[in-house]
């Protein structure tokens, strides 16, 4: 998918497809788009980082949703990338507390 849709011939962990952009964008304003997570890549990344697979999945889903909401760490400025990272940390901490039952 990374090669076919983003012209990047390497594995990726998450890709977001906005339904608010391009032809037909905004037809359903309540649907942001799709987030596709590579479970294989996520499992490898989680193992390398020594974190639970589920935590990696939660983080990647959050990352993809933030992209659908307009956050961009790749094409935006450094300040925008930092803003996205800060938002990820903030929300991820909340999610981890909720999922851990603390």
Image (spheres, rainbow, N blue to C red):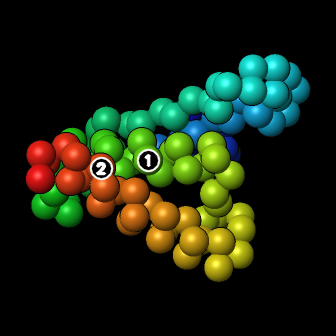
Instruction: Identify the secondary structure beneath mark 2.
Output: helix
Look at 20% across and 63% down and name the residue there: 49
Quarter occupied by residue 19: top right
Residue 54 at what x, y percent from top left?
Answer: 21, 42
User: In the image, 52: left or right of 58?
Assistant: left
Residue 69 at what x, y percent from top left?
Answer: 64, 47
Look at 65% across and 25% down and name the residue there: 31
Label 2 packing within 10 angstroms: few (<14), some (14-19), many (20+): some
Q: Which residue is mark 2?
A: 95
Disc 2 versus disc 1: nearer the observer: 2
Residue 44 at what x, y percent from top left?
Answer: 24, 49
Look at 55% across and 50% down and name the residue there: 66
On screen, residue 10 above or below 34 = below
Q: Is there a contact, CB below 8 Å, between mark 2 and mark 1?
A: yes
The image shows a total of numbered marks equal to 2
Instruction: Identify the secondary structure beneath mark 1.
Output: helix
* Earlier-in-chain disc, 2 versus 1: 1
Answer whether residue 47 is visible to the viewer in this image: no
Q: Which residue is mark 1?
A: 62
Residue 25 at what x, y percent from top left?
Answer: 82, 28
Residue furthest right as drawn: 23
User: In the image, 28: left or right of 44?
Assistant: right
Look at 31% across and 55% down and name the residue there: 94
Quarter occupied by residue 27: top right
Q: CA distance from mark 2 to mark 1?
A: 9 Å
Label 1 packing within 10 angstroms: few (<14), some (14-19), many (20+): some
Answer whether residue 90 is visible to the viewer in this image: yes
């Amino acid at each position: 998918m990374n090669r076919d849709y983003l012209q990047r011939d390497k594995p990726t962990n998450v890709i977001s497809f906005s339904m608010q952009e391009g032809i037909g964008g905004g037809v359903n304003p309540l649907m942001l788009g799709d987030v596709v997570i590579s479970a294989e890549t996520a499992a490898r990344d989680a193992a390398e980082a020594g974190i639970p697979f589920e935590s990696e999945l939660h983080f990647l889903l959050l990352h993809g949703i933030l992209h659908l909401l307009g956050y961009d760490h790749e094409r935006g400025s450094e300040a925008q990338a930092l803003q996205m990272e800060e938002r990820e940390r903030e929300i991820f901490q909340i999610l981890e507390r909720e999922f851990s039952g603390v």
